[in-house]
Image (spheres, rainbow, N blue to C red):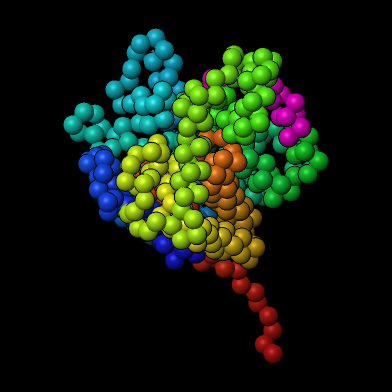
């Protein structure tokens, strides 16, 4: 598991280096911001390794005892971001909360020239949530009753609502999915969880009405990739009004909502079986794909190394997932088992969603590819998660038997 995680981090570093230093030159090679991606990610990888080792120096049960305080700290940071959003609407901007890409998702550590970087609380919330929920569910045996599920749902709604204010729809949906999966593992009845899912689907039209135009555009972009669907929407005023909120212009759509998905699929498909090679290819040389260092880094990997490289990356994730499940299966401590399952669920969902986005099967969510995508907070959180899995795996149960 540790070897697979280390290889994924190295693949991420190599890909970021290729993005900032293309072998064939071109406009991307002159972008200093892209060239700095590798060095920044390398620094976070070293820090993440230190934190992975540090997590193993303390028993995971001891960490669990403080999970409530950890969760409360993260909730406090999310409240600051929500407050920044509210104040921003009236023209008041907090100096330590930057406003980027129309969202408030980061908190600056320091002010002005004394700043040492930013953190993304929603990334840390994922792991803090798993820790606290696992600690809360560890000795509960009464989740067979529907009304007892109210507590965990309230525990989830608080961070979900705060994250939606930023807004970050992808992480909010991820927390809900993790809750349902962990409740099932903890012993909740499948029919109760099914009732909740059906209720959520019944309320989805109301949720659709409150979504921002940006989020609606991301969701409908998956359907509008199909040329027949685009033609039907263009010819039907009713469909056009439902899906795009007005008249549908295919040319404008291809340059706006559909741009990312179409370019991402082109990057994946152009890699073929073995790809263009390290630091080579048009999607390395030119900045055709926005956020190729983070949300769409899997497209760049497939572009460089083709289907073989893409399957190799997925295989490394498979090693981590299977190792995590083996650790959970062989641990008799309820907290350790739930914590391991929660981390595995988080990693699995993030990989499935991110890869599905790059090949056009899901709308753009903003979820990064664990251990590979650029982003200090994301890398630190996932390396700590791997450290916790290793910590649980080192605490193997033992049995006493008569000498034979």
Seen in the image, is 3 located left or right of residue 401?
left
| Position in image of residue 284 (x %, y %) | 35, 47
| Position in image of residue 54 (x %, y %) | 38, 57
Residue range highlighted in magenta:
197-214
Seen in the image, is 126 located left or right of residue 232?
left
| Residue 274 versus residue 248 in the image, above or below | below
| Residue 105 versus residue 3 in the image, above or below | above
Seen in the image, is 94 located left or right of residue 352?
left
Residue 112 occupies quadrant: top left
The extreme right residue here reads 191
Residue 204 highlighted magenta (yes or no): yes
| Residue 289 versus residue 313 in the image, above or below | above
In the foreground, 65 or 297: 297
| Residue 312 versus residue 92 in the image, above or below | below
Q: Is residue 207 visible?
A: no
The extreme bottom residue here reads 404
Q: Is residue 233 visible?
A: yes
In the foreground, 167 or 231: 231
Q: Quadrant of the C terminus?
A: bottom right
Residue 364 highlighted magenta (yes or no): no
């Amino acid at each position: 598991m540790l070897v697979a995680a280390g290889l994924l981090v190295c693949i991420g570093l190599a890909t970021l280096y290729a993005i900032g230093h293309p072998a064939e030159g071109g406009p991307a090679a002159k972008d200093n911001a892209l060239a700095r991606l590798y060095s920044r990610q390398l620094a976070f990888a070293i820090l993440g390794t230190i934190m992975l080792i540090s997590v193993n120096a303390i028993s995971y049960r001891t960490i669990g005892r403080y999970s409530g305080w950890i969760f409360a700290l993260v909730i406090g940071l999310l409240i600051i971001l929500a407050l920044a959003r509210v104040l921003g609407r009236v023209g008041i901007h907090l100096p330590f909360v930057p406003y980027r890409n129309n969202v408030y998702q980061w908190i600056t550590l320091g002010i002005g020239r004394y700043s040492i970087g930013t953190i993304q609380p929603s990334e840390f919330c994922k792991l803090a949530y798993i820790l606290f929920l696992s600690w809360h569910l560890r000795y509960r045996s009464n989740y067979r009753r529907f009304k007892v599920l109210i507590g965990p749902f309230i525990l989830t709604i608080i961070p979900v609502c705060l994250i939606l204010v930023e807004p970050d729809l992808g992480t909010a949906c991820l927390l809900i999915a993790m809750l349902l999966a962990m409740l099932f593992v903890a012993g909740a009845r499948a029919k109760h969880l099914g009732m909740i899912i059906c209720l959520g689907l019944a309320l989805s039209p109301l949720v659709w009405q409150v979504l921002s135009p940006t989020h609606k555009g991301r969701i409908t972009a998956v359907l509008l990739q199909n040329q027949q669907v685009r033609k039907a929407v263009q010819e039907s005023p009713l469909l056009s009004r439902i899906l795009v909120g007005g008249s549908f212009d295919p040319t404008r759509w291809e340059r706006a909502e559909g741009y990312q998905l179409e370019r991402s699929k082109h990057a994946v498909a152009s890699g073929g079986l073995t790809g263009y090679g390290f630091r080579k290819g048009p999607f390395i040389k030119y900045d055709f794909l926005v956020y190729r260092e983070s949300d769409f880094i899997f497209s760049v990997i497939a572009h460089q190394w083709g289907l073989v490289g893409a399957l190799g990356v997925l295989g490394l994730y498979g090693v981590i997932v299977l190792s995590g499940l083996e650790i959970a299966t062989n641990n008799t401590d309820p907290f350790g088992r739930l914590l391991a399952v929660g981390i595995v669920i988080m990693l699995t969902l993030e990989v499935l969603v991110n890869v599905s986005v790059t090949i056009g099967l899901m709308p753009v969510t903003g979820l990064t590819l664990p251990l590979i995508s650029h982003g200090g907070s994301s890398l630190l959180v996932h390396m700590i998660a791997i450290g916790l899995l290793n910590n649980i795996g080192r605490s193997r149960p033992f049995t006493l038997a008569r000498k034979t």
